[in-house]
Image (cartoon, rainbow, N blue to C red):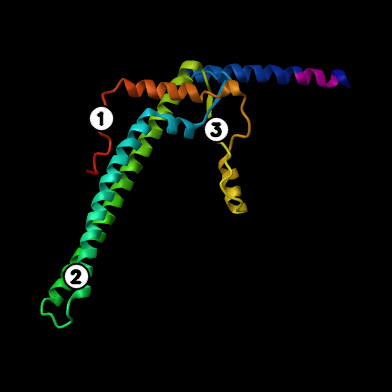
Amino acid sequence: MKRAWLPGLLTGIAVGVTALAFGRSILAQGGATPLSGRVACVNVIHVINEYQRQKDLSEEFNGHRDRVLAEDKQRKDKIDTLQAELDRMDPNDPTLVQRMREMLALQIDYKNWRDLKQADTARELGIWSIRIYREITRAVEALAKRDGYDLVLYKGDFEQVSMDPDVIKDQIRSLHLLYANPAADITQVVLDKVNADYRTKPKEKMLLQVP
């Protein structure tokens, strides 16, 4: 019985070796790098939080937020002052209608201004979120090619933020990497690279669309 399947086994091995060699030949002809079997992982959120560009952007945004809040207070104070004046006016005052129209105009202008500021800020932060993520993925790609990684996986951390079972399930679903050897974690290497690349560029104002 053993001798009966031995020729078939040898034939299968020979075919497999030939197919493997043929596959490598195709990869070489197509310009692809042969697989090395090396895998790494990166905690992307940690890189984003510690990326100097993100820190500079947050500082710039905080300054913008303070200016917007100051203007918001001025506009609200103006509305409150006019409202107090209206409350004191005699209903028979001939200027009451005009002053009420002024109040309505102020309220409409305030709402439009606030909606515009919120939309501008959200668009700016959205644009920069995409740009920062792309900078990180480019750094990961460069490091993977340099160090011979075939795959670089997203590593997340589970943080309990709620006892709601639905929230917990959503958190668990978002974590696709269950374990990684610490030696495969190149988070710090990626962070060092994006920060080094950023520091070589001249400092620039980032929130261009929001004064």
Q: Nearer the viewer, mark 3 or mark 1?
A: 1
Tell me which residue sits at (30%, 46%) in the image: 121
Image quarter in which the C terminus is found: top left
Which of 99/170 is in front? 99
Q: Quadrant of residue 24?
A: top right
For the residues labelled 2 and 1, the Cα–Cα distance comes to 46 Å
Tell me which residue sits at (35%, 37%) in the image: 58
Q: Is residue 84 above or below residue 127?
A: below
Query: From the viewer's perspective, is 28 left or right of 130?
Result: right
Q: Which residues are magenta?
A: 4-9
Q: Which residue is mark 1?
A: 204
Q: Quadrant of residue 17?
A: top right
Tell me which residue sits at (22%, 55%) in the image: 74
Q: Secondary structure at mark 1?
A: loop
The disc, 2 or 3, on the residue closer to the chain's N-terminal end is: 2
Q: Which residue is mark 3?
A: 155
The image position of residue 90, as x and y in percent, is 17, 80
Q: Is residue 104 visible?
A: no
